[in-house]
């Protein structure tokens, strides 16, 4: 590859990701820890500046040539995207997307079927990744539909399969065909009844194509059986749709589709690979037997109980995590359907399961994949929302925010500390302005960014300025859909804080766009936490690498300048108090260092 900037760009991205995701060794004292974190943040700031310059000064002028790119330049750009993309841990999918969109536009103008199919597949794959790694927000369905469109356009070339000379292009066509039904299936959580016919139709079309003798003869070395097994896996995944209903309410036709696919898939023994743990095989068979009426609810419950009790408490493999997330949540669901279990016994058994799973996740060792742990804890919590108590729910979200990204966790601690200082001022001078007790104020501040666990794996490791669609993802952390399902005044308070803390005081700007923070019950607490959030974000000299830090005096000056618009004039006025300013200064200096060290000790298990 002859692109002069490519090697530097790739090396920078790799270094940035390695620094951001590195597991901190135990044994640091406070001073050495702070020095290391500051050095890491400074280096990452340098990398971001270098990468933004490379993109703006070298890559984007080249992309602007579009149809005038030489074949060599287009090939080099495509090679660069292959370095940026990976099935499991893409270096930078957003950047690859920008390049592929340019290459697709060029290919369409040149009517180059090979490049059209190649780039449509890759763009679809990137959107599919975004769908997979972005949880619980409105963009999920959007990414699924964008991926589906690209795959459908690539799969349309099956009608010209025997005329396509490039074997790699034919392989992309085959993959697009399979990913059409995959993305139909991915949208089932939003619209299951409407999507199922499209899923079944596209699945059967793919199976017919892959079993066509002439197609197989054209490319006998293609992994046709693997494609067919993947199709059956996608059918089996619809088991989650059944799981929300008892056997009396389930779609029996869908249950038999799943059963038939499981039988076909099971014959190949591919479930022994790491993407299909043994625990999942056992669980799937139990669930299928239940939904097709082959066994009773009581027998199903007993089998699930036995499996759960056989699980190993310190097994953090894919198999172990499956026991503790999918199996445990399904067991709790089944228990809730059994009307013969006395309520006291039911509650005791559910509490036992939840406590065991909580202990399992509280003891996650440092070397376990953060992405998979976060995904599984979210699945578990979503499944048992109506059973888990509020304190456990909050604890787990905070635990895995710290596990995902230390600076984000410490930011939450610092916002809590700054909020307590400001709220303490009003408790002394205007106690009637505080809408609740200090305990709830502290908890609400601690939880203001709690939903960032859902998005950290997608864009937290970006070594460049975010694209608009990536920032839209980040904005979704200000949604509180799950907390709003909890019937608890603390949950309602924290919901308001989450939804309002990025909205301007006068409600004219910021996000969530349609949220009126002035009408909120806890509006003054939102105002305090908004100020606390800004103070910490602007002054963090330890862990943040994406902005120039300010002094406390500079931040307060900005708050005064925007009093009445972005910030509360009442809080801006309070910041004229020298004692309050001095307390804030100590919090963002020595207090921050203490917070980083305490969080490090917790995460590393050091004592």
Image (tube, rainbow, N blue to C red):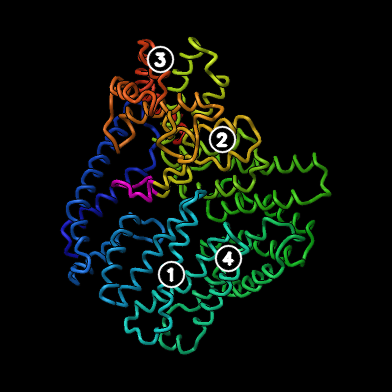
What distance separates the C-alpha of mark 1 from that of mark 3? 57 Å
User: Going by the image, does 538 lie left or right of 389?
Assistant: left
Query: Would you name the residue on which mark 4 appears?
Result: 195
Describe the element under mark 4 as helix, strand or loop. helix
Residue shown at 60% from the left, 47% from the top: 382
Describe the element under mark 2 as helix, strand or loop. helix
What distance separates the C-alpha of mark 2 from that of mark 4? 34 Å
Disc 2 or disc 4, which is closer to the eye? Answer: 4
Question: Considering only order in the chain, which callout, 4 or 1, is on the residue closer to the N terminus?
Answer: 1
Residue shown at 51% from the left, 36% from the top: 398
Query: Would you name the residue on which mark 3 appears?
Result: 574
Question: Considering only order in the chain, which callout, 3 or 4, is on the residue closer to the N terminus?
Answer: 4
Sort mark 1 into few (<14), some (14-19) or many (20+) by Cα contacts within 10 Å: many
Disc 3 or disc 2, which is closer to the eye? Answer: 3
- What are the residue bounds of the magenta stretch? 459-471
Query: Would you name the residue on which mark 1 appears?
Result: 151
**Can the viewer see residue 17 in this picture?**
no
Describe the element under mark 3 as helix, strand or loop. helix
Residue 260 appears in which quarter of the rendering? Answer: bottom right
Query: Relative to the observer, which residue lies in front, 541 or 559?
Result: 559
Residue 356 appears in which quarter of the rendering? Answer: top right
Disc 1 or disc 3, which is closer to the eye? Answer: 3
Query: Would you name the residue on which mark 2 appears?
Result: 394
What distance separates the C-alpha of mark 4 from that of mark 3? 55 Å
């Amino acid at each position: 590859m002859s692109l002069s900037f490519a090697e530097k760009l790739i090396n920078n991205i790799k270094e940035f990701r390695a620094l951001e995701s590195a597991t901190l060794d135990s044994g640091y004292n406070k001073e050495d820890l702070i020095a290391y974190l500051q050095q890491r943040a400074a280096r990452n700031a340098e990398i971001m500046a270098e990468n933004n310059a490379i993109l703006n000064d070298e890559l984007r002028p080249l992309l602007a040539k579009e149809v005038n790119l030489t074949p060599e330049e287009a090939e080099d750009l495509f090679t660069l995207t292959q370095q940026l993309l990976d099935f499991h841990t893409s270096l930078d999918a957003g950047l690859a997307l920008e390049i592929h969109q340019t290459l697709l536009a060029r290919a369409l103008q040149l009517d180059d079927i090979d490049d059209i199919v190649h780039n449509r597949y890759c763009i679809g794959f990137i959107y599919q990744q975004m769908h997979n790694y972005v949880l619980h927000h409105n963009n999920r369905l959007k990414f699924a539909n964008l991926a589906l469109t690209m795959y459908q356009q690539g799969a349309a070339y099956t009608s010209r399969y025997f005329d396509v000379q490039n074997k790699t292009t034919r392989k992309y066509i085959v993959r697009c065909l399979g990913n059409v039904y995959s993305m139909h299936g991915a949208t089932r959580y939003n619209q299951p009844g409407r999507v199922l016919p499209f899923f079944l139709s596209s699945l059967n079309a793919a199976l017919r194509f892959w079993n066509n003798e002439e197609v197989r003869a054209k490319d006998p070395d293609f992994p046709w059986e693997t494609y067919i097994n993947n199709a059956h896996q996608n059918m089996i995944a619809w088991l989650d749709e059944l799981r929300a209903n008892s056997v009396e309410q389930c779609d029996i036709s869908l249950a038999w589709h799943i059963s038939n696919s499981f039988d076909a898939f099971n014959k190949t023994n591919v479930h022994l690979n790491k993407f299909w743990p043994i625990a999942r095989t056992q669980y799937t068979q139990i669930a299928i037997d239940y939904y097709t009426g082959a066994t009773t609810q009581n027998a199903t419950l007993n089998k699930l109980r036995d499996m759960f009790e056989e699980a190993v408490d310190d097994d953090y493999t894919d198999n172990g995590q499956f026991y503790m997330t999918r199996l445990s949540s399904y067991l709790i669901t089944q228990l809730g359907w059994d009307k013969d279990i006395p309520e006291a016994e039911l509650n005791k058994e559910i509490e036992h399961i939840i406590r065991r799973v909580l202990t399992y996740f509280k003891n996650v060792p440092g070397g376990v994949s953060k992405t998979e742990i976060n995904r599984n804890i979210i699945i578990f919590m979503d499944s048992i929302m109506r059973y888990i108590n509020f304190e456990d729910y909050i604890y787990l979200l905070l635990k895995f925010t710290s596990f995902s990204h230390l600076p984000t966790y410490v930011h939450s601690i610092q916002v809590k500390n700054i909020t307590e200082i400001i709220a303490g001022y009003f408790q002394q001078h205007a106690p009637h302005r505080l809408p609740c007790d200090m305990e709830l104020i502290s908890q609400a501040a601690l939880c203001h960014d709690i939903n960032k666990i859902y998005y950290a794996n997608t864009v937290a490791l970006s070594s460049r300025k975010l694209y608009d669609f990536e920032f839209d993802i980040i904005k979704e952390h200000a949604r509180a859909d799950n907390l709003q399902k909890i019937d608890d005044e603390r949950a309602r308070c924290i919901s308001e804080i989450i939804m309002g803390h990025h909205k301007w005081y006068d409600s004219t700007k910021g996000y969530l766009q349609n949220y009126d923070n002035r009408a909120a019950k806890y509006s003054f607490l939102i105002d305090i936490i908004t100020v606390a959030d800004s103070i910490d974000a602007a002054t963090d000299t330890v862990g943040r690498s994406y902005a120039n830090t300010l002094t406390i005096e500079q931040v307060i000056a900005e708050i005064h300048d925007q009093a009445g618009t972005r910030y509360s004039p009442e809080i801006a006025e309070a910041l004229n108090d020298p004692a309050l300013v001095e307390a804030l200064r100590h919090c963002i200096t020595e207090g921050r260092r203490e917070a980083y060290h305490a969080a490090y000790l917790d995460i590393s298990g050091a004592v």
